[in-house]
Every structure is written in structure tokens, then in C-alpha cells.
Image (tube, rainbow, N blue to C red):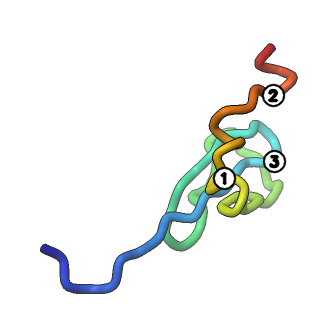
Amino acid sequence: MPTGPMLRLRFFVCQQCETVFADPERPPPCSCGTDVPMREITGDVQTEPYFTELRDVDT
């Protein structure tokens, strides 16, 4: 059983291609090659609607 501090995942989205990344500290560079900074969405994905509501592009 781990005895050290537990790291909480943070979620980031690439603002160019909308790929979502999870990392305890900082987002990895996106493979789409953009220089656009990642946007943190940790607070958004911690709520149930993020997983249950369809986006307009999904319908």
C-alpha cells in the first residue's frame, strides 16, 4: 500500500484538435503540432454532465 502523497490527475484539452490529456502536473505536448496553449478543464470533467451530455458535433 502506498504511503506517500497521492497525486490528483489534472485534465487538459488541446484548443486546436480538442484532444484531452490527463497528467498530475502539466500537459504533454499535443501531437497535432500546435503552439496553442493547452486549457485546463479539470473542474469541468469532475462534474457528471461532462460525461452524460452530448455535444452538438456528437449528434
Question: Is disc 2 in contact with disc 1, using a CB cutoff of under 8 Å?
Answer: no
Mark 3 vs mark 2: in front:
2
The span from disc 3 to disc 2 (Cα, nearest Å) is 16 Å
Residue 45: percent from left, percent from top: 65, 52
- Toward the bottom, the furthest residue is 4
- Checking the image for residue 47, the label placed there is 1
Q: Which of marks 3 and 2 is nearer the N terminus?
A: 3
Callout 1: helix, strand or loop? loop
Give the residue type at disc 1: Thr
- Toward the right, the furthest residue is 56
| Left or right for 24, reference 29 | left
Residue 44 against residue 59 in the figure, above or below = below
Q: Which of marks 3 and 1 is nearer the N terminus?
A: 3
Tag 2 residue: 55
Residue 40: percent from left, percent from top: 72, 62
Residue 21: percent from left, percent from top: 58, 50
> Which residue is depicted at the point 33% across and 84% down?
5
- Checking the image for residue 24, the label placed there is none
The span from disc 3 to disc 1 (Cα, nearest Å) is 20 Å
Mark 2 vs mark 1: in front:
1
Give the residue type at disc 3: Gln
Q: Residues within 10 Å of mark 3 (few under 14, many from 20)?
A: some
Mark 3 vs mark 1: in front:
1
Tag 3 residue: 15
> Which residue is depicted at the point 12% across and 73% down?
1
> Which residue is depicted at the point 71% across and 44% down?
33
The span from disc 2 to disc 1 (Cα, nearest Å) is 15 Å
Callout 3: helix, strand or loop? loop
Question: Is disc 3 in contact with disc 2, using a CB cutoff of under 8 Å?
Answer: no
